[in-house]
Image (cartoon, rainbow, N blue to C red):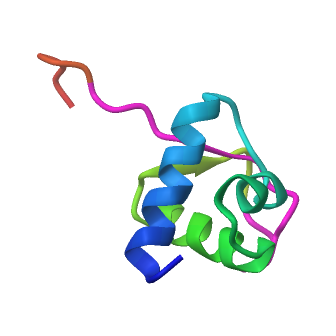
């Protein structure tokens, strides 16, 4: 990956492609980054509200947590 934006987009694309929750190891394998970089990116995306996790994260390097994309709002929905 060339930069953080590329990594973020690759992580989002991997989560979209599978459509099921993934842990950092699965994301790392799908994107070609290290598991530590994957979990850091997933944690940042969670903080931005783009990704959700199956529970509270124990620390920044919780490699076993399951992450999934937050569904995009549907047209015409009130939020």
The answer to whether one can see residue 73 in this image is yes
In terms of secondary structure, what is the magenta stretch mainly?
loop
Q: Say left or right for 42 vs 4.
A: right
Q: Is residue 49 or residue 40 the one in the foreground?
A: 40
Q: Residue furthest right?
A: 64
The answer to whether one can see residue 59 in this image is no
Q: Say left or right for 49 vs 54.
A: left
Residue 38, placed above or below residue 16: below
Q: Quadrant of the N terminus?
A: bottom right
Residue at left 64%, top 59%? 31
Residue at left 64%, top 32%? 18
User: How far across and how far down the image is residue 14, in percent?
Assistant: 59, 46
Q: Which residues are magenta?
A: 57-73
Q: Residue furthest left?
A: 76
Residue at left 49%, top 46%? 13
User: How far across and how far down the image is residue 25, in percent?
Assistant: 83, 59
* 29 falls in the magenta region: no
Count of all numbered marks drawn on residues in the image: 0
Q: Is residue 76 or residue 21 the one in the foreground?
A: 21
Q: Quadrant of the C terminus?
A: top left
Residue 34, placed above or below residue 49: below
Residue at left 76%, top 76%? 34
The quarter of the displayed image where residue 3 is located: bottom left
The quarter of the displayed image where residue 20 is located: top right
User: How far across and how far down the image is residue 22, in percent?
Assistant: 74, 44
* 69 falls in the magenta region: yes
């Amino acid at each position: 990956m060339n930069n953080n934006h590329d990594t973020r987009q690759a992580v989002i694309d991997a989560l979209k492609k599978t459509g099921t929750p993934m842990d950092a190891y699965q994301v790392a394998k799908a994107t070609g980054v290290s598991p530590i970089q994957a979990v850091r990116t997933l944690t940042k995306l969670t903080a931005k509200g783009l990704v959700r996790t199956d529970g509270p994260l124990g620390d920044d390097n919780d490699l076993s947590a399951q992450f999934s994309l937050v569904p995009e709002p549907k047209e015409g929905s009130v939020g």
